[in-house]
Amino acid sequence: MEKYYQNLSCPDCKNSLVFLKGSFSCPACKKGYRLEEGIPVFLNDEQWEKWQKEDIVYNPYLQGGHFLSSTDFYAKYGRSWQKVADIGGGDGVNSAELAEEGKDVYVLNPGFLALQKLQKRGIPGLHPICCEGENIPFADEFFDGVLNIFVIEHLSDPFPILKEIRRVLKKEGEAVIGTDNRFYDKYGKIIKTSLLHAFNKNIPIHSPNKTHINLMMPKDLRSILKKANFEITKEEILRPQYLDPVWGSIPKGLREEFMSGMFIFTCKPIK
Ligand SMILES: [Zn+2]
């Protein structure tokens, strides 16, 4: 049995789970949860069915059956954390680095294929859990930090997942939420690739990602984080480097809505 199983709680009643003879049970509400290839699973049959079909769609890195090598781009956010949740973390591409640095990293993802890929990384501190982000199998205030990178644009309503992230975060904890900018994702990428295509026919024109059903602008994320009881401590609006010299002189609304590619907000629970 893996040591991290001891830290799991019932996603329904939040009581500590007991692991016995290859499965989990909740002593309080009597619900049971299974283990599949060493990975705890918290999906019902209907959710399992749905997610195994959509796994490839929700994990573009897995197309072709390989994963991206771990990137340290997001690891910088977690340097002061010990217990980390990477929610919707796929094969661990954004958090594997933190596990290699000795942190306890729990990668929560509903698609199972991605988690099998994660296991192949063979990193002891990288713990796969198959569940939806709206129903996290951990007690309140368990985590020092949460990464939620390129997830909310796939959700029809991001409020339930943000509320759940707020619940499992310590009072002094931090959440890092990253998402694509609506204008750039819907139109910017097409404009850019069409221009490039005009010069080089080998460059394909971008086709929009159909699973991006909730693309936001920075102001939308500000408002929903406030509703979920978070205070934003840092905003990063990512843009092309050539805009750096003029960025400050462009009106804020204009540059945020039409000139940024994605944005990453760091926030903490409001007490
Ligand atoms: Zn229970």
Image (tube, grey):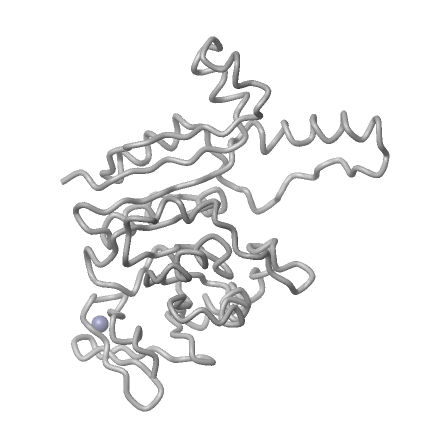
Q: Please state, as top left, top right, bottom left or bottom right, where the C terminus lies in the image.
A: top left
Could you say where residue 233 lies in the image, as x and y percent from the top left? Answer: 28, 32
> What residue is shown at x 47% (from left), y 39% (from top)?
179
Can you tell me which quadrant of the image ligand 1 is in? bottom left
Can you say whether 77 is above or below 239 in the image?
A: below
Q: Is 145 left or right of 248, judged from the image as shown?
A: left
Can you say whether 95 is above or below 196 in the image?
A: below
Q: What is the residue that sits farthest to the front in this orientation?
A: 101
Could you say where residue 23 lies in the image, as x and y percent from the top left? Answer: 34, 84
Q: Quadrant of residue 88?
A: bottom left
> What residue is shown at x 21% (from left), y 41% (from top)?
269
Q: Is 171 left or right of 215, judged from the image as shown?
A: left
Choose between 245 and 15: the one closer to the eye: 245
Q: What is the residue that sits farthest to the bottom in this orientation?
A: 21
Q: Please state, as top left, top right, bottom left or bottom right, where the N terminus lies in the image.
A: bottom left
Choose between 29 and 106: the one closer to the eye: 106
Q: Quadrant of residue 258?
A: top right
Can you say whether 189 is above or below 98 in the image?
A: above
> What residue is shown at x 51% (from left), y 61% (from top)?
91
> What residue is shown at x 49% (from left), y 22% (from top)?
257
Q: Is 175 left or right of 196, judged from the image as shown?
A: left
Could you say where residue 230 lies in the image, as x and y percent from the top left? Answer: 25, 38
